[in-house]
Image (cartoon, rainbow, N blue to C red):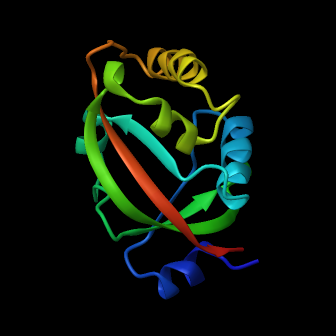
């Protein structure tokens, strides 16, 4: 398995991170990315504005599992602002979680943002779509 440092040499500027807010969620979501089921994600606009450096279209990202081991590298293909209440069934499917329904997406993401300390139906999200460029 390639180390994070070696991957950062191959993909200059790449940040290493995991999805979710627990090791179990990180591993589960990383598995969905590797299998091609998960091709999208989102986060609150506030959290994106606080990131340094902030993700951008074309950037590479090293995805970690719950044990902080790299599992794949993704490239950001698109990013757009959308309010939580305006997320579509199509986007929920691209997130690849649960039964792929908008109802499941709303329930789980409301819980996630509530655990993070902020949730509102009108909150702005950065909806991003990505492609896997290397499975490790």
| Residue sticking out furthest to the front | 90
Q: Using the image as rendered, state which of residue 111 and residue 85 is in the foreground.
A: 85
Which residue corresponds to the image point at 70% horizontal and 28% vertical from the top-left? Answer: 99
Which residue corresponds to the image point at 38% horizontal and 63% vertical from the top-left? Answer: 77
**Residue 101, placed above or below residue 14:** above
Q: Is residue 136 left or right of residue 39?
A: right
Q: Is residue 50 left or right of residue 88?
A: left
**Location of the N terminus (image quadrant):** bottom right
Q: Using the image as rendered, state which of residue 51 and residue 121 is in the foreground.
A: 121
**Residue 97, placed above or below residue 2:** above
- For residue 53, what is the image quadrant? bottom left
**Residue 16, placed above or below residue 123:** below
Q: How many marks?
A: 0
Which residue corresponds to the image point at 70% horizontal and 60% vertical from the top-left? Answer: 34
Q: Position of residue 60 (x, y in %)?
A: 43, 70
Which residue corresponds to the image point at 48% horizontal and 16% vertical from the top-left? Answer: 110
- For residue 82, what is the image quadrant? top left
Please say whether residue 52 is visible from this viewpoint. Answer: yes
Q: Position of residue 35 (x, y in %)?
A: 73, 58
Please say whether residue 50 is visible from this viewpoint. Answer: no
Q: Using the image as rendered, state which of residue 104 and residue 109 is in the foreground.
A: 104
Q: Position of residue 10 (x, y in %)?
A: 51, 87
- For residue 24, what is the image quadrant? top right
Q: Is residue 78 left or right of residue 66?
A: left
Q: Position of residue 92 (x, y in %)?
A: 52, 34
**Location of the C terminus (image quadrant):** bottom right
């Amino acid at each position: 398995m390639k180390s994070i440092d070696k991957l950062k040499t191959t993909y200059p500027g790449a940040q290493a991170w995991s999805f979710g807010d627990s090791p179990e969620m990180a591993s589960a979501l990383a598995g969905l990315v590797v299998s091609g089921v998960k091709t999208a994600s989102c986060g609150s606009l506030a959290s994106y504005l606080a990131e340094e450096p902030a993700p951008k279209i074309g950037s590479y990202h090293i995805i970690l599992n719950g044990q902080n081991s790299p599992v794949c590298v993704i490239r950001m293909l698109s990013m757009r602002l959308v309010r939580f209440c305006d997320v579509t069934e199509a986007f929920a499917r691209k997130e690849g979680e649960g039964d792929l329904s908008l109802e499941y997406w709303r329930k789980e993401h409301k819980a996630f943002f509530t655990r993070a300390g902020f949730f509102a139906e009108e909150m702005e999200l950065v909806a991003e779509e990505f492609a896997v460029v290397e499975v490790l």
